[in-house]
Amino acid sequence: MYRKMIWLFACCLGLALQAADPGIEPRRKIRQAIENPATAQTAAETALTDADPAIRLYGLYHYTRIHGEKALPKLFAMSMDKDPSVINFLTMFAASAQDREAGQALLLEIMNKNPNHTLRRMAARYASTFKFHKVTKRRKFDPQWDYELRPVQTIDLPLTGWRFTTDPLVNGHENGFYEISFDDSAWKLLKIGGWNKQGFPDYTGIAWYRITFTLPEKIDSKAVELYFRGVDECAWVWLNGVYCGQHDEGAAGWNRPFYLDVTEEIKWNAANTLVVRVDNSTMDGGIWKPVSIEILK
């Protein structure tokens, strides 16, 4: 996929360098120099530091075409480039590298050093190894039950006391944020509601919530569900270190309630640790409506 996208970039680069603006003459000259086999290598390398982002992008494509993955060490100097097209090309090239270690090193360089949050996040998404997905089914819709399961009791989880942290590098899962033993004491304390007005104004991206709650002695039941009334926008959920499922409908899912079966994961008469990974792409985000435990029989 990445290589196909790089090829599409190449199809557009020639057009970009022919744009009718004050930079047309320098763009024409660099294109001619790169097309000349005798000067192509030097011209492509020189273009990498040009003030014109269209020239940098054109030079970047041809420099990587000439040198292949051997170009990766040279490209570290471009990790702080402010042009989205340049960084997008860098991330795709790094993500598609057969030399996985070298490619990841370049992505980390962009993630750690680029001054633009959006561009850092772009690289983080290419570098992310987050693959969690689970096909979920509520037990009340399972055809093996020959009678309807109905809620017999609702246990509301606290509205306050949720531990919270942002995850701009999209690597919280690699750091074990969902594990029961993870130490979240340094995380901020938030309440149910958007995170923008609780000390994280204008933040968009990945963030994590954790809370520990205790349930009573087992209630006579056939199934137990987590009920989320609203998470803006997407959510991935663990209970007691076990991945339970996701609510991944994109921006449209911000106000859609959802259920996850936790019959096997719940601990009665004991402490339970709930962890929610949230992804928000615009405006406010987070667990903005109450969460509860639904007991069914």
Image: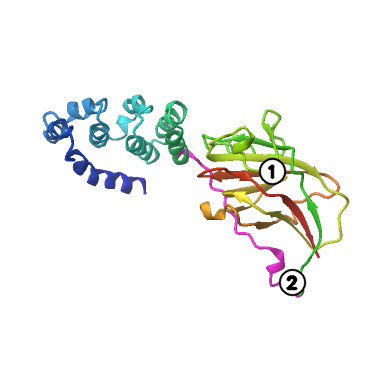
Residue 93, located in which quarter of the rendered image?
top left
Disc 1/disc 2 C-alpha distance (Å): 35 Å
Q: Is residue 178 left or right of residue 10?
A: right
State the quadrant of the C terminus.
bottom right
The answer to whether residue 24 is visible is: yes
Q: Label 2: state its secondary structure.
A: loop
Q: Residue at x 87, y 49 (%)?
A: 216
Most extreme residue toward the right is: 217
| Residue 263 among magenta residues | no
User: What colour scheme governs how the chains and residues are painted in the rendered image of this protein?
Assistant: rainbow
Marks counted in the figure total: 2
The answer to whether 143 appears left or right of 112 in the picture is right
- Residue 176 seen in the figure: no
Residue shown at the point (59%, 38%) measured from the top left: 196
Q: Earlier in the sequence, mark 1 or mark 2?
A: 2
Q: Which residue is mark 1?
A: 192
Asked where in the image residue 271 lies, by quadrant, the reply is: top right
Number of the label disc, if any, that sits on residue 145: 2
Residue neighbourhood size for the residue with mark 1, other residues' Cα within 10 Å, grouped as few (<14), some (14–19), many (≥20): some
Residue 167 percent coordinates (x, y): 56, 35
Dots 1 and 2: beta carbons under 8 Å?
Answer: no
Q: Nearer the viewer, residue 230 or 55?
A: 230
Residue 73: percent from left, percent from top? 34, 26
Position of residue 236 measured from the top left corner of the image (x, y, whole percent): 61, 48
Q: Amino acid at mark 2?
A: Trp
**Within the magenta stretch, is there residue 128?**
yes
Crowding near the residue tagged with mark 2, few <14, some 14–19, many ≥20 C-alpha atoms within 10 Å: few
Which region of the structure is painted magenta? 127-146
Point out residue 56 in the picture as x, y percentages from the top left corner. Answer: 26, 31
